[in-house]
Image: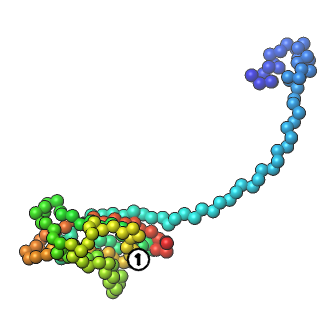
Amino acid sequence: MNRNAALLLLPAALLAAAALSPAFQDAEPAPAAAPAAPEEIRIVVLPPQRTPHWDTVVVDHDLPERLLVVPQGQRFVLTDLLVTTHDYFRDQAASADDRLWLEGVSGARRSVVFDALSGELDLPLHWETGVAFGPGDEVWFSYKFAGDGKSDWLRRLHYSGYFEAAGAE
Protein backbone atom coordinates (compact mmCIF):
# COMPACT_ATOMS: atom_id res chain seq x y z
CA MET A 1 0.00 0.00 0.00
CA ASN A 2 1.41 3.42 -0.86
CA ARG A 3 1.64 6.40 1.49
CA ASN A 4 -1.42 8.26 0.13
CA ALA A 5 -3.63 5.20 0.46
CA ALA A 6 -2.52 4.75 4.08
CA LEU A 7 -3.42 8.38 4.89
CA LEU A 8 -6.97 7.95 3.57
CA LEU A 9 -7.58 5.11 5.99
CA LEU A 10 -6.50 7.03 9.15
CA PRO A 11 -9.07 8.90 11.22
CA ALA A 12 -8.75 12.69 11.12
CA ALA A 13 -7.33 12.89 14.67
CA LEU A 14 -4.47 10.63 13.78
CA LEU A 15 -3.65 12.53 10.61
CA ALA A 16 -1.92 15.31 12.47
CA ALA A 17 0.16 12.87 14.51
CA ALA A 18 0.99 10.82 11.43
CA ALA A 19 2.16 13.90 9.60
CA LEU A 20 4.75 14.45 12.30
CA SER A 21 5.94 10.85 12.21
CA PRO A 22 9.33 10.35 10.50
CA ALA A 23 7.91 7.38 8.60
CA PHE A 24 5.59 9.72 6.65
CA GLN A 25 7.94 12.62 6.23
CA ASP A 26 9.74 13.01 2.93
CA ALA A 27 13.30 11.86 3.02
CA GLU A 28 16.13 14.13 2.04
CA PRO A 29 16.28 14.49 -1.72
CA ALA A 30 18.86 12.26 -3.34
CA PRO A 31 21.94 14.03 -4.64
CA ALA A 32 21.78 14.80 -8.32
CA ALA A 33 23.17 11.99 -10.42
CA ALA A 34 26.25 12.68 -12.48
CA PRO A 35 25.42 13.36 -16.11
CA ALA A 36 25.37 10.16 -18.17
CA ALA A 37 28.27 9.62 -20.50
CA PRO A 38 27.29 9.97 -24.13
CA GLU A 39 26.33 6.67 -25.72
CA GLU A 40 29.23 5.06 -27.54
CA ILE A 41 28.71 4.91 -31.29
CA ARG A 42 30.09 1.81 -32.98
CA ILE A 43 30.47 1.42 -36.71
CA VAL A 44 30.01 -2.14 -37.84
CA VAL A 45 31.07 -3.10 -41.34
CA LEU A 46 28.89 -5.94 -42.54
CA PRO A 47 30.27 -8.56 -44.93
CA PRO A 48 28.87 -8.56 -48.44
CA GLN A 49 25.39 -10.00 -48.65
CA ARG A 50 25.47 -13.43 -50.26
CA THR A 51 22.49 -15.16 -51.79
CA PRO A 52 22.95 -18.94 -51.96
CA HIS A 53 22.12 -20.64 -55.25
CA TRP A 54 22.05 -24.32 -56.18
CA ASP A 55 20.50 -26.34 -58.93
CA THR A 56 20.45 -29.75 -60.56
CA VAL A 57 20.41 -30.13 -64.32
CA VAL A 58 20.43 -33.07 -66.68
CA VAL A 59 23.32 -32.95 -69.14
CA ASP A 60 23.18 -34.80 -72.47
CA HIS A 61 26.22 -36.53 -73.93
CA ASP A 62 28.49 -33.97 -75.60
CA LEU A 63 25.89 -31.15 -75.62
CA PRO A 64 26.97 -28.05 -73.67
CA GLU A 65 24.41 -27.00 -71.05
CA ARG A 66 24.05 -23.39 -69.91
CA LEU A 67 23.78 -23.49 -66.12
CA LEU A 68 22.96 -19.82 -65.56
CA VAL A 69 23.39 -16.21 -66.66
CA VAL A 70 24.76 -13.92 -63.96
CA PRO A 71 22.45 -10.91 -63.42
CA GLN A 72 23.84 -7.41 -64.03
CA GLY A 73 25.35 -5.89 -60.87
CA GLN A 74 26.03 -9.35 -59.43
CA ARG A 75 28.70 -11.98 -59.63
CA PHE A 76 28.26 -15.70 -59.14
CA VAL A 77 30.79 -17.70 -57.15
CA LEU A 78 30.68 -21.44 -57.90
CA THR A 79 31.79 -23.46 -54.87
CA ASP A 80 30.68 -27.05 -55.53
CA LEU A 81 30.08 -29.33 -58.49
CA LEU A 82 29.02 -32.98 -58.44
CA VAL A 83 28.30 -35.25 -61.41
CA THR A 84 26.18 -38.35 -60.81
CA THR A 85 24.40 -41.05 -62.72
CA HIS A 86 20.88 -40.14 -63.79
CA ASP A 87 18.22 -42.09 -61.85
CA TYR A 88 16.67 -43.63 -64.97
CA PHE A 89 19.98 -44.58 -66.55
CA ARG A 90 21.88 -46.49 -63.85
CA ASP A 91 23.44 -48.76 -66.49
CA GLN A 92 25.34 -45.80 -67.99
CA ALA A 93 28.52 -46.17 -65.99
CA ALA A 94 31.04 -43.37 -65.81
CA SER A 95 34.56 -43.88 -67.08
CA ALA A 96 37.85 -42.27 -66.08
CA ASP A 97 38.10 -41.30 -69.78
CA ASP A 98 34.84 -39.29 -69.80
CA ARG A 99 35.56 -35.62 -70.54
CA LEU A 100 34.12 -32.75 -68.51
CA TRP A 101 34.50 -29.02 -69.06
CA LEU A 102 33.29 -25.87 -67.40
CA GLU A 103 33.61 -22.40 -68.85
CA GLY A 104 32.41 -18.85 -68.54
CA VAL A 105 31.25 -16.92 -71.59
CA SER A 106 31.15 -13.14 -71.65
CA GLY A 107 30.25 -11.76 -75.06
CA ALA A 108 32.81 -13.20 -77.49
CA ARG A 109 35.24 -14.12 -74.69
CA ARG A 110 35.34 -17.71 -73.42
CA SER A 111 37.18 -18.55 -70.20
CA VAL A 112 37.80 -22.25 -69.62
CA VAL A 113 37.75 -23.13 -65.93
CA PHE A 114 38.68 -26.74 -66.62
CA ASP A 115 38.64 -29.22 -69.49
CA ALA A 116 39.74 -32.58 -68.17
CA LEU A 117 39.17 -36.29 -68.10
CA SER A 118 37.00 -37.49 -65.25
CA GLY A 119 39.89 -39.59 -63.92
CA GLU A 120 42.06 -36.45 -63.63
CA LEU A 121 39.58 -34.64 -61.37
CA ASP A 122 39.00 -35.20 -57.68
CA LEU A 123 35.20 -35.45 -57.86
CA PRO A 124 33.10 -33.99 -56.38
CA LEU A 125 34.75 -30.63 -56.97
CA HIS A 126 34.84 -28.11 -54.12
CA TRP A 127 36.56 -24.73 -54.17
CA GLU A 128 37.25 -22.94 -50.86
CA THR A 129 37.33 -19.53 -52.52
CA GLY A 130 35.09 -20.44 -55.44
CA VAL A 131 35.24 -19.72 -59.15
CA ALA A 132 33.83 -16.25 -59.87
CA PHE A 133 31.77 -15.29 -62.91
CA GLY A 134 31.05 -11.59 -63.51
CA PRO A 135 27.90 -9.65 -64.39
CA GLY A 136 26.29 -10.90 -67.61
CA ASP A 137 28.54 -13.98 -67.81
CA GLU A 138 27.06 -17.30 -68.84
CA VAL A 139 28.21 -20.45 -67.05
CA TRP A 140 28.39 -23.56 -69.27
CA PHE A 141 29.11 -27.23 -68.54
CA SER A 142 29.58 -30.23 -70.82
CA TYR A 143 30.00 -33.97 -70.28
CA LYS A 144 31.23 -36.28 -73.03
CA PHE A 145 31.16 -40.02 -72.45
CA ALA A 146 34.19 -41.98 -73.67
CA GLY A 147 33.57 -44.58 -76.37
CA ASP A 148 31.00 -45.05 -79.10
CA GLY A 149 27.24 -45.55 -79.08
CA LYS A 150 26.55 -43.21 -76.16
CA SER A 151 24.87 -40.31 -77.93
CA ASP A 152 21.68 -40.70 -75.86
CA TRP A 153 23.42 -41.05 -72.48
CA LEU A 154 22.79 -38.56 -69.66
CA ARG A 155 24.43 -37.31 -66.48
CA ARG A 156 22.95 -35.39 -63.59
CA LEU A 157 24.92 -32.32 -62.51
CA HIS A 158 24.48 -30.74 -59.07
CA TYR A 159 26.14 -27.38 -58.45
CA SER A 160 26.05 -24.70 -55.80
CA GLY A 161 27.50 -21.31 -55.03
CA TYR A 162 26.25 -17.82 -54.25
CA PHE A 163 25.46 -14.46 -55.79
CA GLU A 164 26.85 -11.24 -54.36
CA ALA A 165 27.24 -7.62 -55.43
CA ALA A 166 29.75 -7.33 -58.29
CA GLY A 167 32.12 -5.05 -56.32
CA ALA A 168 32.11 -7.18 -53.15
CA GLU A 169 35.39 -8.45 -51.79
Q: Is residue 90 above or below residue 75?
A: above
Kindly tell me whether residue 59 is visible in this rendering. Answer: yes
In the rendered image, residue 103, in percent from the top left (x then y), is placed at 30, 78
Q: Which residue is mark 1?
A: 134
Kind of element beneath mark 1:
loop
In the rendered image, the residue lying farthest to the left is 149
Q: Is residue 45 above or below residue 134?
A: above
Taking depth in this image into account, of 21 and 124 the one nearest to the observer is: 124
Q: Quadrant of residue 80?
A: bottom left
Residue type of the residue flagged with mark 1: Gly
In the rendered image, residue 21, in percent from the top left (x then y), is placed at 89, 20
The residue located at (17%, 63%) in the rendering is 86
The residue located at (85%, 22%) in the rendering is 23
**Does residue 145 appear to the left or right of 29 in the view shown?**
left
In the rendered image, residue 32, in percent from the top left (x then y), is placed at 85, 43
Q: Quadrant of residue 31?
A: top right
Kindly tell me whether residue 71 is visible in this rendering. Answer: no
